[in-house]
Image (cartoon, rainbow, N blue to C red):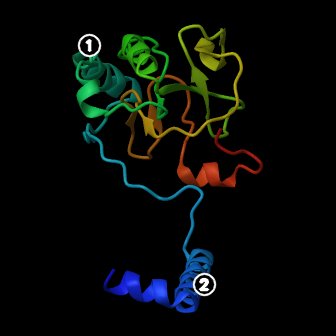
Amino acid sequence: MRGIVAWFARNAVAANLLMIVAFTGGVFGYTKMEQEMFPVVNITGASVSVTWNGASPQDVEDQIVTRIEEAVADIDGLDRIVALEQGMTVAAYWPIRGEPDLRPWMQRVHDVGAHVLLPVVIEEHTPLEFRTWSPDSRMVRGVWNILVPAHGAPRRPDVVIAPLVGVDKALHRLGNGVAVVVGVNQHRQRDGRTDE
């Protein structure tokens, strides 16, 4: 035996001291490391911006949002965009009106071992909760008569797939229901709720 391994074999005290220094440095470094429960992430996506002076929100909904939603209603290719992995959490939505129907895709997500989450409005003007959905989940009618999982602890999604939403100049949501903002900062403010 030659080299550093041979030297440490002959000098056991030095090897143990080096191990203690490395361990202490690791513990010290860990305590100084910046940690975030919900790190800020940049999410890429598509954005459509249209100015239509004098148009009502209903005009924008009917003439722009609905047409775009219809054009992508037979969404194909999410499997190429979202790299599914066993154990990951993917938030989708239960379709209403002209929204794309992702239920077949949700089944495929479930089949590969990922967890499908659906949004649930617990109380108006509060952040959404996401609950686990599976093909055998018991569903109930939630706010706006949309089917949601009947039970389940709140979960945090890794990926969110959402229907197209339009806004007016004042950033008021156009379309079905009312705006329920879901953001990382709002999830941070939820006391006592953690991921499963």
Residue 185 x, y percent position in the rendering: 58, 55
Q: Is residue 44 above or below residue 92?
A: below
Left or right: residue 40 compared with residue 133: left
Residue under the point 36% across and 48% down: 43
Residue 46 x, y percent position in the rendering: 26, 40
**Quarter where residue 71 is shown:** top left
Kind of residue indicated by mark 2: Ile
Residue under the point 63% across and 77% down: 31
Residue on which the image places disc 2: 20
Left or right: residue 180 compared with residue 45: right
CA gap, disc 1 and disc 2 = 60 Å
Residue 164 x, y percent position in the rendering: 36, 29
Q: Which element carries disc 2, helix, strand or loop?
A: helix
**Quarter where residue 58 is shown:** top left
For the N terminus, the image quarter is bottom left
Q: Is residue 121 above or below residue 50?
A: above
Left or right: residue 161 compared with residue 22: left
**Quarter where residue 67 is shown:** top left
Residue on which the image places disc 1: 74
For the C terminus, the image quarter is top right
* Pointer 1 with pointer 2, Cβ within 8 A: no
Q: Is residue 117 above or below residue 99?
A: below
Badge 1: residue crowd in 10 Å (few <14, some 14–19, many ≥20): few
Residue under the point 25% across and 20% down: 72
* Numbered label attached to residue 30: none
Q: Which element carries disc 1, helix, strand or loop?
A: loop
Q: Observer-nearest residue: 173 or 153?
A: 153
- Which residue, as the protein is rendered here, is positioned at the far front? 1
Kind of residue indicated by mark 1: Asp
Depth check, mark 1 against mark 2: the one in front is 2
Q: Observer-nearest residue: 17 or 121?
A: 17
Instruction: Choose the circle earlier in sequence order: 1 or 2.
Output: 2
